[in-house]
Amino acid sequence: LLCEDLEDRFELAHCSTELLLLQAAREESMLDPMTTGGSQVSPLVRRLALRCMSQVTIAQQLPKTIWYQAVVVLDAWLAARTPSVSDSSFLQEMPAVCSVVLDVLCKTNADKTQNRHPGRVENGEIVHEVMQTLGYDLPAASPHDLHVMEQSLLLDLQWQVNMPTVESWISMLGARFGVITQDLYAEPLAEIAEEVCNLAKKLVMWKPADWQRRPRRLAGGLLGIGLVGASLLRIEDLRPHY
């Protein structure tokens, strides 16, 4: 059992055991419809949407955490939407969809975005420009389209948009490692976390999360490999005990 002093330090570092358990429970509730329903669009169209949202976060100077959250929100929404959506209809909606997902997350993460709300219309215009450069000649989303899309997203997800991501798990697990080691390896740990997040981005672009590739498992595996590569952890510690 963890001693009280260690638990107190975990809490100060925003990586308490209670928080990890809460995130794990949220992850399970998020993954259940995603696993049973699955994405309603092809991998190619999904990757296009993620690429568009990445361009918006860069153009609007939003924190990287917003993009990782946008990925899981979009995947959960695609699994929950009724009626189902085809590739062609989703392409028509993509400027509105990407814009609304990012706008909702900016509102719910005002502390991380420093109260910066670029606006749904502005985000939609960026997505529209990105799609045009890729050869998709689609009309831009109107304010009415954006309003309707936001209502649809919040209702389909039952207002549950605060979902754990591979990036948030990497951050929390890394913070716990830092507490346990009393921040003796703070600098290499920060470099490892950045490299691992870059690799995680490529993996989540490739395929949505499911029970085999849940964010917690992916984060733990990638971070463990990074720590072993930096000689901060023995490979024996990563092997199953059975």
Image (cartoon, rainbow, N blue to C red):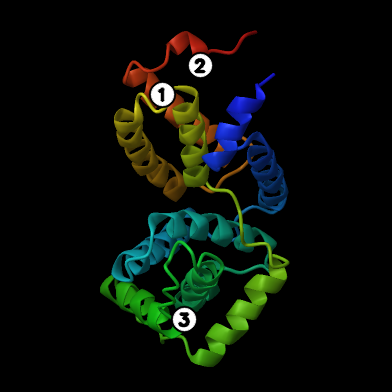
Residue 4, by quadrant, is top right
Residue 47, by quadrant, is bottom left
Cα distance, mark 1 to mark 2? 8 Å
Picture quarter with the N terminus: top right
Q: Can residue 69 be seen by looking at this rendering?
A: yes
Cα distance, mark 1 to mark 3? 39 Å
Q: Earlier in the sequence, mark 1 or mark 2?
A: 1
Q: How many marks?
A: 3
> Dot 2 corresponds to which residue?
238
Q: Earlier in the sequence, mark 2 or mark 3?
A: 3
Residue farthest front in this picture: 5
Image x and y of residue 225, in percent: 41, 23
> Dot 1 corresponds to which residue?
225
Q: Secondary structure at mark 2?
A: helix
Q: Is residue 139 left or right of residue 218?
A: left
Q: What is the three-letter code of the residue carrying label 1?
A: Ile
Residue nearer the viewer, 149 or 89: 149
Residue nearer the viewer, 190 or 83: 190
> Dot 3 corresponds to which residue?
120
The reply to whether the C-beta atoms of the residues labelled 1 and 2 are less than 8 Å apart is: yes
**Is the residue 4 above or below the residue 208 in the image?**
above
Image x and y of residue 22, in percent: 69, 44
Residue farthest left in this picture: 133
